[in-house]
Amino acid sequence: MKQAIVDFGLISSIGFGKKETKANLFSEERSGLNPYKLPNGKETYIGDISGDLAQIPSKFSQLESRNNQLLLTVFQQIETTFNNLKKSIQPERIAVVIGTSTSGISDVEAAFEFKKESNSFPKNFHYKKHEMASPSEFLAKYIGATGPSYTVSCACSSGSKAVTSASRLLSSGLCDLVITGGVDTLCNLTLLGFNSLEVISEKPCLPFSQNREGINIGEAGALFIMTNEKGKLNLLGYGESSDAYHHSAPEPEGKGAQSCMNLALNKAKLKADEIDYINLHGTGTLQNDSMEAKAVFRTFGNSTPCSSTKSLTGHTLGAAGAIEAAFSLLALEEQKLIPHHWDNLPDSEIPNLNFSSNQHAVLKNIMSNSYAFGGNNCSLVLGIDS
């Protein structure tokens, strides 16, 4: 299979858009994570986005949320490309598939705080703000698309699963263009929820280090315009699997993760040694990094360069698969490996992988991994045509 990624936009704690993101993504200096104190007093670091976000038009006030502001900010980066393409495509042939895990929950939290003080909700509050359908509904209405429109919410693989859903819509002939990706914003529900699981790190996370203590949480968004036409940047294949092992812990040996990577390779008609770089899920938790290292080592050995970008952005949950796919596309465009930021102290209990540094390389095919609660796994294979 081969489907074109005609254009893409992104936002995270390391940048608004491609230019700013590239400056920080390929830097030897680590950035993106900032000190933060949880409501319960615990100190941690988060990948928060500062700066002005796009304003939601008043006619979509019921869908106004920080999450949809982030989504619109990203869409504006690709809006010119989309407007040029839609001239020759009927609205019913345009689909929207967005991944998220928080939707507008932060706005709901603020609304309930307001209600505690005033005994009523804010005048502009509407339940649609926090529906999981909100991002896809808002974007479809904003661009005037009347084709299939839905949100994928399967925790930390939501953003990449949205891309696979978009691919299937194109393959089935149900549409000619899909805008897909993922968006998630910070909220106390996820920050305190992961803290209750005892996986929040008080320090900047250190994926795959012997000193790793857990994750940092971030927020981000990335969108892709996909078509069935061949392009310079392409989705070459994907793999999906489900461990059905535990509702939050991954299968310890990474069997589902390995199956997922092999399925992606088969769909892309590639061998393991034809993957030039792997963007690891790499959360910085003891269990995730252990199982992923085992799965990657069994599939690729320890020669393929790889890195986790969560040490820059934090774990952006429902947006992680999308933002990391966008980072992978930037690596293809720049022909540069994304450096792995850590303390250079590997865990002797798990396979030692080939963690990359900031350097130029010949990159043709990249794999991006995303793993989620319930063993909901997804691997994307992205490629560039020279």
Image (cartoon, rainbow, N blue to C red):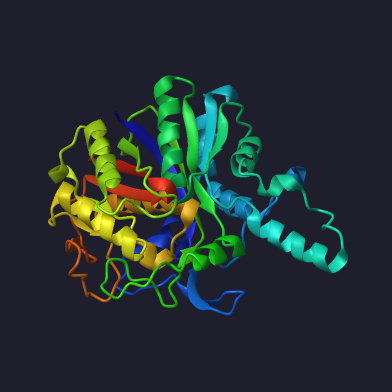
**Image spot of residue 90 (x, y percent):** 56, 22
Q: Is residue 325 visible?
A: no
Q: Nearer the viewer, residue 98 or 287?
A: 287
**Image spot of residue 338 (x, y percent):** 28, 61
- Residue at left offset 46%, top offset 70%: 200
- Residue found farthest to the front: 246
- Residue at left offset 17%, top offset 63%: 352
Q: Nearer the viewer, residue 330 or 250?
A: 250
Specify the quadrant that holds the N terminus: top left
Measured along the vertical axis of the image, is residue 291 above or below residue 170? below
Specify the quadrant that holds the C terminus: top left
- Residue found farthest to the top: 173
Q: Nearer the viewer, residue 159 or 81?
A: 159
**Image spot of residue 195 (x, y percent):** 51, 68
Q: Is residue 157 visible?
A: yes
Residue 113 appears left or right of 320: right
Q: Quadrant of residue 202?
A: bottom left
- Residue at left offset 35%, top offset 31%: 3
- Residue at left offset 76%, top offset 61%: 112
Measured along the vertical axis of the image, is residue 141 above or below residue 46? above
Task: Count numbered badges in the picture.
Answer: 0
**Image spot of residue 177 (x, y percent):** 48, 29
Residue 95 appears left or right of 202: right
Measured along the vertical axis of the image, is residue 238 above or below residue 335? above
- Residue found farthest to the right: 119
